[in-house]
Amino acid sequence: MSDWQVIWSHQVEGPVNDVNVDEHGALVASGQTLFSLRTDGSLHWRSDQIFDVYSIEVAGSSVAILTGTSIHVLDRHSGRPLSDGRSIPGGYRQVLSRPGGGWVASDRGDHLHVFRPNGRGIRRLRVGSMRGLIGWLDREHLLMLDLDGALRCVRLHGEHAQRRIEDRRWMWCSSLERGRLLLLDVEGALHEGVPNPFGWDELDRISDGDIEPYRAVRCMDGWWSMDLEGRVRHALEANHLGFGDDVVDHISSDGAGSILTATKEGLLRWSVAPGISGLRAEGRRSQEEEERRRLDWLQRSTMFESAQQAEDEGLWSRALELYRALGRDEDVRRILGLQEGSD
């Protein structure tokens, strides 16, 4: 495998509490401010909050943030608030977007809070204590990791029910990425699996204990993990493939060919997969060529209109000059005939 390439870096005022990447760029929670950065690193918009922003979740054209004891929903493209915010004593721990629209947030106790897409609350469910929300199997079935390391599936529809999908315990588990999980067992071996509400569709052991992940993201070339020391590496490779020994605190990906890393102090680095930078350069060249063709067409269109106007006003020499510049031989011959007829 080839190395990933850093295409831009940026320093923001820390502390950075969370980052999130999608197809539009990056969202960075830095202190009381949420920054939206384009894919080239330029600032798109910023939204200032009263309290520190500590969690970001993106769903299409909306973004949910946790700040203070509240959850707020903003417009992804402008940062405009879409809700007044909903607060609870103690605040929320984590928020996930819900398939088909809406949000679910866990509090610091044993409840889940279900929200509409605009951030308005629907219901509260008591599901018991948990380590974290893992992801959705479908709109009604939510996977979570218990305090003892068991995976539990909660059904939100109707009278909610829940069950552990197996008896095995896991030391660590990634978020659910395109239906797949990365998991660390009690022996330190790494597994990748496809869960369902009753167990596993697939579960494969992919390494034998040479990695201790803290966070992980899935990209076009597989899983990338950040270990407890803050070093980024590929789950199946022995080296860092372009990320080196730099220590980071946050990692996020668009699920394809881009990874954003951030330190607590505010150093952001946007890296792209091998070949992506070349594709982007080719894309820029294509855009530049298209723009040149567009400008050339506009210029020729303006010249043609000027030639027609000169012809209408009887300015034969000017019309001839413009038609010749445009390469319109038939119009040149026609104007020469008109010019001879007027002599």
Image (spheres, rainbow, N blue to C red):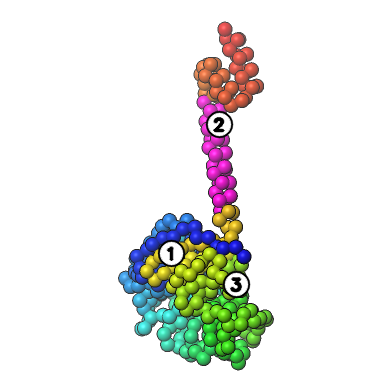
**Residue visible at 59% across and 54% down in the picture:** 279
Whether residue 267 is visible to the viewer of this picture, yes or no, is: yes
Amino acid beneath label 3: Glu
Q: Which mark is residue 300?
A: 2
The disc, 2 or 3, on the residue closer to the chain's N-terminal end is 3
Q: Principal SS element in the magenta part?
A: helix
Q: Nearer the viewer, residue 10 or 241?
A: 241
Amino acid beneath label 2: Arg
Is the residue marked by circle 1 packed among few (<14), some (14-19), or many (20+) residues within 10 Å? many
Q: Report the Cα–Cα distance between label 2 and label 1.
A: 45 Å
Which part of the image, by quadrant, shows the N terminus? bottom right
In this rendering, the answer to whether 214 lies above or below 221 is below
The disc, 3 or 1, on the residue closer to the chain's N-terminal end is 3
Give, as a single range, the part of the protein colored magenta: 280-306
Query: Which residue, given by chain and number where applicable, does mark 1 sit on?
Result: 268
**Residue visible at 56% across and 63% down in the picture:** 3
